[in-house]
Amino acid sequence: MVKSNKATKQICPLVDTINVISRKWFLLTLNTIGVEEKIGFNGILNRIDGISPKALSDVLKQMESMGLVKKVIINSSPPRVKYSLTTEGKRLRKAVIPLLKWAADYTGHYDCPILNSNKVSKE
């Protein structure tokens, strides 16, 4: 039996990324922004059933810090905020779509709004 030594154990650099994208609301938020292209906070909140404003805010901050989402403040009265995917966010969304399609096949949940959007079916 091989003993594990923390000092010499190599850590996969993907672990942090996988931990972030596997968060409860991450993929739904990523897809919602991707489908809409530019969308405000309340628009995202209204399209994802069950998400709280705090959970959405936390996910958006994380996505922005990872360079996956761009936040644009629109000077109006009152000021508005729009979110859109960056190039990396679009690449991640495109990579995740086959996984979501597999999950639909595996579970038989073909009525999922993620898969029924026009943008998903073309990719």
Image: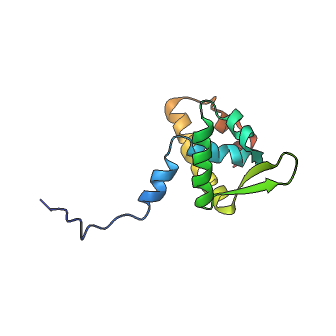
Relative to 106, is 77 above or below? below
Residue 49 horizontal side relative to residue 119, left or right: left
Colour treatment of the image: rainbow
Q: Is residue 8 left or right of residue 64?
A: left
Residue furthest bottom in the image? 8
Q: In the image, what residue occupies the spot 62% across and 50% down?
A: 60
State whether residue 97 appears in this view.
Answer: no
Instruction: Identify whether 99 is placed above or below 16.
Output: above
Q: Is residue 5 visible?
A: yes
The quadrant in which residue 4 appears is bottom left
Residue occupying image coordinates x 72% and y 56%: 71
Q: How many numbered discs?
A: 0
Q: Is residue 10 above or below residue 107?
A: below
Q: Nearer the viewer, residue 78 or 5?
A: 78
Furthest-front residue in view? 77
**Would residue 120 be found to the left or right of residue 77 on screen?**
left
Q: Position of residue 122 (x, y in %)?
A: 73, 46
Residue 16: x %, y % from top left: 44, 58
Residue at 61% in and 42% down: 56
- Which of the 4 quarters of the picture holds residue 88? bottom right
Quick one: 90 or 44, which is closer to the camera?
Answer: 44
**Which residue is at the far left?**
1
Q: Residue at x 63, y 57 (%)?
A: 64
Quadrant of the image containing the N terminus? bottom left
Q: Nearer the viewer, residue 110 or 112?
A: 112
Measured from the top left, where is residue 22 in percent x and y? 49, 47
